[in-house]
Amino acid sequence: MKCVICKHGETRSGHATVTLSRGEMTLVVKKVPAVICSTCGEEYVDDDIMQRLLETAASALRSGVQVDVRDFVAA
């Protein structure tokens, strides 16, 4: 797929690091499956994966986590 940001690069499968913050909580998730632009490096995460990340962040916030770094775990 063509990158929608730079309009030049093609995307390819890879892994991204996603940082989510809400209030005092910051969650960093490494090794998230994504497609990445070969030209500008823009990362695109699938809607289902992003929903899982948001649910994980909400759970971390409820449990009082301030900062957490973890690897993505496939379901």
Image (spheres, rainbow, N blue to C red):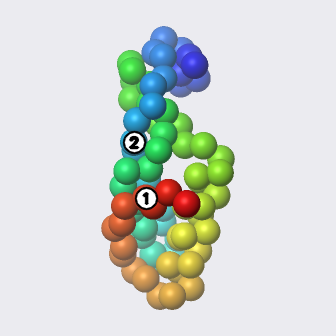
- Which residue: 48% across, 17% down? 10
Question: Could you say where residue 72 lies in the image, as x and y percent from the top left?
Answer: 43, 59
Seen at 36% across and 55% down, the residue is 30
Amino acid type assigned to the residue bearing label 2 in the image = His
Residue 4's x, y, as percent? 58, 23
34 lies left or right of 28 = right
Q: Earlier in the sequence, mark 1 or mark 2?
A: 2
Task: From the viewer's side, name the closer residue of 37 and 7.
Answer: 37
Please identify the quadrant where the N terminus is shown. top right
The C terminus - image quarter: bottom right
**Inter-mark Cα distance, 1 to 2:** 10 Å
Is residue 20 among what the camera can see?
yes
Label 1: element kind = loop
Q: Position of residue 22 (x, y in %)?
A: 53, 70
- Residue on which disc 1 sits: 72
Where does residue 49 sit, x and y in percent of width and height? 58, 52
Q: Residue at x 50, y 57 (%)?
A: 74
Query: Which residue position holds label 2?
Result: 15
C-beta proximity under 8 Å, tags 1 and 2: yes
Question: What secondary structure is marked by label 2?
Answer: strand
Tally of numbered discs = 2
* Rendered image: mark on residue 9: none
